[in-house]
Amino acid sequence: MELLVYCVGYGVEVVASVAMGPLLDRRDAGQVLVVSCLVKIGIFVLIGLSSSFLSSHLWTIVIAAAAVDFVHHVGGMVLFVLLPRIVDRRTLVKIQGIAATARSAGEILSPVAAGLIIAVLPGGRGLIAAAGFQILALALFAGVLMTVRRAAASEPFEDTETEPEEETTDPQSLPSRREVANTMVSSRPWRRYAIFHCLSVLALSTLFLSWLPLMREALDMSAARAGAFLAFSTVGAVLGGLFRSAGLVVQLQAPIAVLGTWNGLLDAVIRVVDAAGILAAGFLFDLVGGHAVFVCLGLGLLVSAALWSRFGRTDQKNLTATPLHEGLPTT
């Protein structure tokens, strides 16, 4: 059951990355984010009110999980595209570092909050509380967006080439998804970036998902001790939040006019490779045991680190040397 929901969730996220990327380039990203949040709130409330029906029908659980994953992923894509269009490069780096740290801190606190909510609202009714948190997040986003746009309006741009994409580029003249894909495939620096990033995400995500069964198998930990260890290990993610830079490469180097399509295609490829690797690691874990899988994952991380060390300034500079960069504005 969990594997089915997991695979469906990954599948809809791949579809969202490919299908919604061009839409974000041609529509107001802020409006898309508001709509996605409202849809998510509606889904949470609907699931919460009909939890007894959902629990007795497998297909409804799968559909509900797929809908939540789709809308949640679209919201993340919107933020990825929107931030470079409303803040400058230096501020973007700071915001992404702080946001990464805040998300990691939330990963520590959210299990505690979820446990309290489930104790008060058992079953799917706990999602009603999640809808409340989503409303709060939407209100905060609206306030921040209004503040940023008011500040931008009070300080007009002197250089028209640095103005936001939606004011200088005709959405109808943007390149298609196929043109963007061909550009990335034909660019050696972007091919290298995609391969290195895929390998890093594959090794790290598989390592994290396999960590709990390895502790139970090799160290004979109880479920409580293993859970406590994992909760403590997220402290490292909080401290290292400022060093998450792979996504920033795309935000800073891809043409901002097609940032949604560009990031969506990369994200789809990474998720397909990641899902295949996780499934393969799960089967290998059952066949040969956790130690062998972890040795392979460790070697993968070492190879990934060695590859990234060869991704130098020349490669980073050449990321902007594509035909689309010549005719479209960048961040």
Image (cartoon, rainbow, N blue to C red):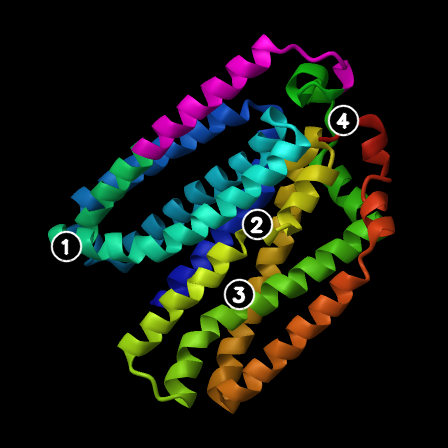
**Discs 4, 1 touching: Cβ within 8 Å:** no
Instruction: Judge whether residue 22 can be spotted in this image.
Output: no
Label 1 Cα crowd, 10 Å radius (few <14 / some 14-19 / many 20+): some
Secondary structure character of the magenta stretch overall: helix
Q: Is residue 59 above or below residue 166?
A: below
Q: Earlier in the sequence, mark 3 or mark 4?
A: 3
In this rendered view, identify the residue nearer to me: 156 or 272: 156
Disc 1 to disc 2, C-alpha distance:
36 Å
For this view, does 297 lie left or right of residue 112?
Answer: right
* Element under disc 4: loop
Residue position marked by numbered label 3 in the rendering: 205
**Residue 209 visible (yes or no):** yes
Q: Amino acid at mark 1?
A: Pro
Labelled pair 1, 2 in contact (Cβ < 8 Å): no
Cα–Cα span, label 1 and label 3: 30 Å
User: Which one is in front, 153 or 134?
Assistant: 153
- CA gap between label 3 and label 4 equals 34 Å
Q: Amino acid at mark 2?
A: Leu
* SS label for mark 3: helix
* Local SS, label 2: helix
The amino acid pointed to by label 4 is: Pro
Residue drawn at the location 62% of the way across and 27% of the way down: 85
Which residue is the site of mark 2?
A: 242
Q: Residue furthest front?
A: 239
- 5 up-or-down from 315: above or below: below
Residue pointed to by mark 1: 122
Q: Earlier in the sequence, mark 3 or mark 2?
A: 3
Instruction: Give the labeled residue for mark 4.
Output: 329
